[in-house]
Amino acid sequence: MSRTRSVEPRICMPSWRNISRRAHRCAFYEAEDVLAEIDDVDLICPDMGWGARVDEYWLRTPLYHDVTRKLVFANPGLRKVRLERHYDLLIAGFRTLWDVPYINAIQGWRDHCKISACWIGELWAAAVPDHKYWLPALTQFDFVFLEFRDTVAALSNAINRPCYWLPGAVDALRFSPLPRPPLRTIDMYSIGRRHEGIHREMLEAAERRGLLYAHDTFANLAMNEVHDYREHRNLVANLAKRSRFFMVASAKADAPDQRQGQVDVGHRYYEGAAAGAALIGEAPASGAYRELFPWQEAVIEVRPDGSDILAVLDDLHSDPSRLAAISARNTREALLRHDWVYRWDTLFKIAGIQPSPGSGARMQRLKDLAELAGSAEQSERFNRATEDA
């Protein structure tokens, strides 16, 4: 259901937060919250109806073979929501194509929204042909955005209309260690997918050297349900900005069968950089990475088998000034490049919509913190935080 606002909302944003609280969706809900903070947004949050999980299964299973191309326009068991006002823009975020049928629970949205846009989080170019019966649903949107840049051409060709690149991001205000950088008492933080060779070396180092190595113990944390997505994001942020080193790997680095050679940037890069940790791991061999992370030592590369991880960490530990500079630089660049407000601003410009009323104020807060990260006094604080820990 929609929430009550004192200002007439101009944006309709369906959100699936009442349907799933899986960890991999929490960053998407964070993005929605940032937009709701800076603009006049009606968050439409349908619930699952009785027996919806069964309905959803029986809808999706044959969808991959639906030659009628009609099942993708069916409601997979969500309680229906009928819009009661008109909006300038509808934005529907889909974590994967699996989410696309959820939009069918919002009745009459095409008649109530002047312009519509959808944003797909994970879609690999190699998977586009496998979803040919899902794709007709995307043509009902005026604008289609993709998080993975190398998928844009494949999807554009498949649906015969231009698609646009809109990379991931982070709530940089939530993740920033500024204005009072905490002590970095965690040596290495690893969340999500990882290279097992590096993981084994870090486990042994934790035993031999007493390093504090914080890491997932679930087989697939992303698919686990969280109690509260905001609490989950706060926990990740608080751990990240207390970590000297933050492990990163390209999106689905351990799933080459899904990527089929495609290399793209995962959310860990935005989170670790915003938290001011030194990113350790893989610098993706992609144009997207080079455009998004063009600054010096954005990622300190190590071999996937972990054979040089301890030597690299020792080298960084031996030079506190270098480590402090990396921390301050990552913090500053993330504040200026990778907050969700910049992604929403890009979407508005492409869709021909006026910028969000509150975007300027948020951008100014980000700029002020970025300037603080670059000041001599703050650099000294970063240095003390990395040394004292």
Image (cartoon, rainbow, N blue to C red):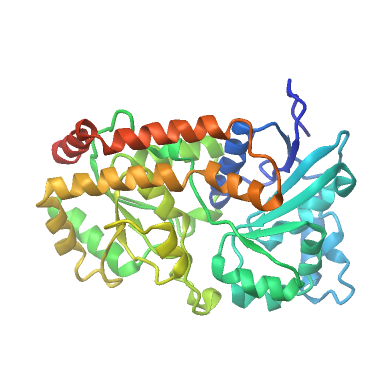
Total count of labels: 0
* On screen, residue 358 above or below 258: above
Residue for point 34% across, 43% down: 331
Q: Quadrant of the N terminus?
A: top right
The x and y percentages for residue 269 are: 40, 55
The x and y percentages for residue 291 are: 43, 61
Report the residue that reaches farthest toward the top. Answer: 6
Q: Is residue 12 visible to us here? A: yes
Report the residue that reaches farthest toward the left. Answer: 318
Q: Quadrant of the C terminus?
A: top left
The residue nearer to you, when weighing 119 against 288, is 288
Judged left or right of residue 259, residue 180 is left
The residue nearer to you, when weighing 370 against 110, is 370
The answer to which quarter of the image holds residue 285 is bottom left
Residue for point 43% across, 58% down: 292
Judged left or right of residue 111, residue 228 is left
Residue for point 77% across, 27% down: 8
